[in-house]
Image (cartoon, rainbow, N blue to C red):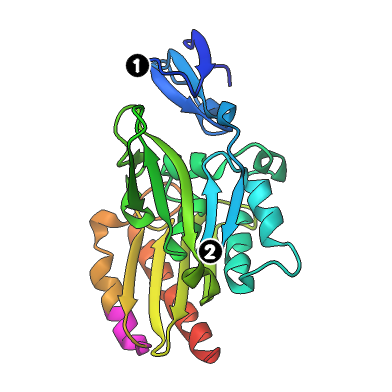
């Protein structure tokens, strides 16, 4: 869709002061998906030339401008490190309801910043204990856990002028056992509930995260493997109606039911891997 109110596109590295009507541009698949009459100027992040992925012993740094296709290609590379983490990454990449052609343009950072409840990069990043590297126009940076980055549908903690520079996925989470379960109304449809689980450490610490069914990510952690009743109780407490999404794709009680059901599948699958 044309953004007819936009008057200019400038280099994202420009020191121009932020003004009302500005927006950061990466892939643009969300930005150009609907009318945005308030936009006047786009600041192009692709001019930075950030490497899509940087692998170190500490984990992976995923640039905000890394495309979904680039991330998926890494996740499906035979012999690459962290096979369990890569499997979860691949599963989340394939949870996009859009065409694979869109994956060539859509970016990881754009999906996080769009803050859509069904955003699969949010699901992936929360599951793998990701941290957002946020940068202000003056170069100052701060780190924000992904589970705190999204504050509601279409809403993040970014202040005016701040951008998401990258997403860091720690090696410990990538190496841990992880499982993903998802429900959509049809095969390539939008997720109505997506639950991930990650288990690591000698005592089997478990973290279960719920996305798509909720207005923001919800995670519960256990120091050791919980029983089915313990997991169910914690999740029901963590999923009050006000946090459950209510739209044309599903009502809150159904989404809560799916989240709890999928969480038990995740718990059971990870218990069998011990």
Total label count?
Answer: 2
Picture disc at residue 183: 2
Residue 109 placement (x, y as % from top left): 50, 42
Q: Which residue is pictured at 57% across the width and 41% down the height?
A: 107
Q: Mark 1 points at which residue?
A: 17
Q: Which residue is pictured at 48% across the width and 70% down the height?
A: 173
In the rendered view, does 177 fall on the left or right side of 240? right
On the question of residue 96 being in view, the answer is: no
Earlier residue among tags 2 and 1:
1
In the rendered view, does 235 fall on the left or right side of 168? left
Q: What stretch is highlighted in magenta?
A: 225-233
Residue 264 placement (x, y as % from top left): 43, 80
Picture disc at residue 73: none
Decide: marks 2, 1 in contact (CB < 8 A)? no
Q: Residue furthest top?
A: 7
Quarter where residue 200 is shown? bottom left
């Amino acid at each position: 869709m044309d953004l007819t109110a936009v008057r200019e596109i400038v280099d994202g590295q420009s020191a121009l002061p932020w003004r009302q009507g500005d927006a950061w541009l990466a892939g643009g698949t969300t930005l150009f998906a609907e009318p945005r009459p308030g936009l006047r100027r786009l600041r192009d992040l692709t001019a930075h030339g950030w490497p899509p992925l940087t692998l170190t012993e500490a984990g992976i740094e995923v640039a905000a401008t890394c495309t979904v296709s680039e991330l998926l290609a890494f996740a499906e590379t035979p012999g690459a490190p962290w096979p369990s983490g890569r499997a979860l990454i691949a599963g989340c990449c394939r949870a996009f309801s859009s065409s694979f052609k869109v994956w060539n343009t859509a970016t990881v950072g754009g999906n996080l910043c769009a803050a859509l409840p069904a955003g699969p990069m949010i699901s992936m990043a929360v599951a793998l204990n990701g941290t957002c590297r946020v940068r202000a126009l003056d170069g100052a940076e701060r780190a924000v856990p992904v589970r705190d980055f999204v504050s509601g549908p279409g809403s993040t903690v970014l202040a005016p002028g701040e951008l998401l520079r990258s997403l860091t996925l720690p090696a410990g989470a990538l190496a841990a056992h992880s499982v993903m379960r998802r429900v959509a109304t049809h095969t390539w449809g939008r997720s109505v509930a997506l639950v991930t689980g990650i288990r690591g450490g000698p005592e089997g610490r478990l973290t279960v995260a719920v996305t798509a069914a909720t207005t923001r990510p919800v995670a519960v952690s256990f120091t050791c493997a919980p029983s089915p009743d313990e997991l169910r109780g914690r999740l029901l407490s963590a999923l009050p109606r006000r946090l459950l999404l209510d739209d044309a794709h599903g009502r809150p009680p159904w989404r809560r039911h799916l989240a709890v059901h999928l969480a038990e599948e995740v718990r059971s699958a990870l218990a069998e891997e011990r």
